[in-house]
Amino acid sequence: MKVLIVGSGGREHAIAWSVARSPRVEKIYCAPGNAGISQYAQCVPIGAMEFEKLADFARTEQIDLTIIGMDDPLVGGVADVFEAQGLKVFGPRKNAAILEGSKAFSKDLMKKYGIPTAAYENFHDPGKALEYLRTQAKFPIVLKADGLALGKGVLICKDLAEAEAGVKEIMEDKKFGDAGNAMVIEEFMTGREVSVLSFVDGKTIKTMTSAQDHKRAMDGDQGLNTGGMGTFSPSPFYTEEIDRYCQEHIYQPTVDAMAAEGRPFTGIIFFGLMLTQDGPKVLEYNARFGDPEAQVVLPRMENDMIDVVEACIEGRLDQVELKFQDNAAVCVILASDGYPVKYEKGVPIYGLENFDGKEGYYCFHAGTAFKDGQIVTSGGRVLGITAKGKDLKEARSNAYKATEWVSFATKYMRHDIGKAIDEA
Ligand code: AMP
Ligand code: GLY
């Protein structure tokens, strides 16, 4: 088979690694890809939002399957463009990707179908939002831009003044662009966060092993929200009992709700959960693999990715049993100093060859490029260093050891990825 992957981050590198292991795959392309992905795939210079060009490429090169890694093209309807041309594509159609594309939609869906989530109100008008905050809100409170905002459109406000400033930022100054045309105001919850990714074929859902991300930029969960600074899998806090509850009250009900709304979901649903005192609740849905969750979940998956993806597209996921290794993985992101605000690019990276032939160690590229034959930084998140171990402690120690194998002048990382393990 010839497979095309759309995206250019660490997640797409992990997907490419997984796809490359399938004996059924003869050639992989990635659009636009990055320097690391080019180890497994031929990178083609087409942007993830250039739907017609992507589809033309898939047709001309006789691609058998296209896997969409990123949220923006899915929410924008790339799957519909492929399907309309008879091309096989993995990822939800536009009318289903709205599960991630509109937080107001997803909150209303959960309310209508009784899926546990934080209490909320949706607003389309900043005046009404301000009135609500002044008269009815309890603080802290959470403001969320309705649309996609690179994981940055969520503001936790400790008092009215912060919330007023937040409404201005999101709805009036449009800091997140059109994502702020509408806004969700929701109850602040506390608890541990867990990411559960799943394969979905429209009716059946099969969940993968759990993971936990670290969204803040600095140690001790300080600093700004980022795309994610590191992950571990599995989460020791995600017990079998919690899993049973979620399967019954969250996972299958979400898939059934989407089908009932005439928006059958085929692809990956990523459940961002908070384990609260009142049980697990949905923080958010994503319509694709997490980044960097994919970098710890996929290396532990035993199935052939292509078999599972085809089963989803063909509506026979009920016949698939997902299998994960009985071990653990930790991913530490090496970022550019200054991320997520301002950082240098084009900085040479040394030591990548140290990963060659090291079983159980992975160096997934997130923001890298070639410059004069040398691999250099090209983004805020640069590399995802993943290591496996027999348990989480060993995986963490292996991952931090491997972070020393690579160097670049602007290298920055958190030192407490997986610290929560010690509390389990
Ligand atoms: P989201 O993009 O919706 O996952 O939100 C980003 C982060 O904001 C989450 O990972 C949580 O840490 C935090 N967050 C979102 N919603 C809430 C909430 N209702 N209560 C507390 N924290 C939240
Ligand atoms: N790691 C969170 C995300 O992919 O959105």
Image (cartoon, helix red, strand yellow):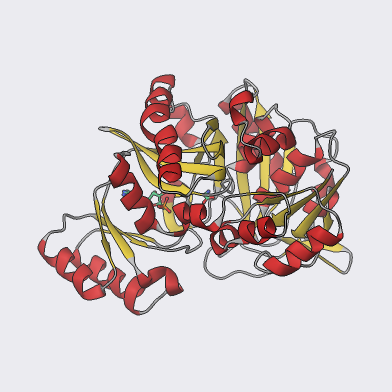
Q: Is 150 located above or below residue 256 in the figure? A: below
Quadrant in which residue 199 is drawn: top right
Q: Indicate the position of residue 219 as horizontal and vertical percent values.
A: 47, 48
Quadrant in which residue 43 is drawn: bottom right
Q: Is 18 located above or below residue 174 in the figure? A: above
- Residue name at image x 61 percent, y 44 percent: 332
Can you say which quadrant of the picture contains the N terminus?
top right
- Residue name at image x 56 percent, y 57 percent: 71
Quadrant in which residue 19 is drawn: top right
Front position in the image: 159 or 11: 11
- Residue name at image x 40 percent, y 30 percent: 246
223 relative position to 291: left or right = left
Would residue 36 be seen by someone viewing this image from the given angle? no
- In this view, which residue lies farthest toward the bottom? 173
- Total marks shown come to 0
- Residue name at image x 33 percent, y 51 percent: 107
35 relative position to 323: left or right = right
Front position in the image: 198 or 416: 198
Q: Is 134 located above or below residue 192 in the figure? A: below
Q: Indicate the position of residue 22 as horizontal and vertical percent values.
A: 80, 35
- In this view, which residue lies farthest toward the left? 135
105 relative position to 140: left or right = right
Q: Is 400 located above or below residue 246 in the figure? A: below
153 relative position to 11: left or right = left
Q: Indicate the position of residue 293 as horizontal and vertical percent values.
A: 57, 42
Front position in the image: 228 or 423: 228
Q: Indicate the position of residue 125 as horizontal and vertical percent values.
A: 26, 73
Can you say which quadrant of the picture contains the C terminus?
top left
Would residue 129 be seen by someone viewing this image from the given angle? yes
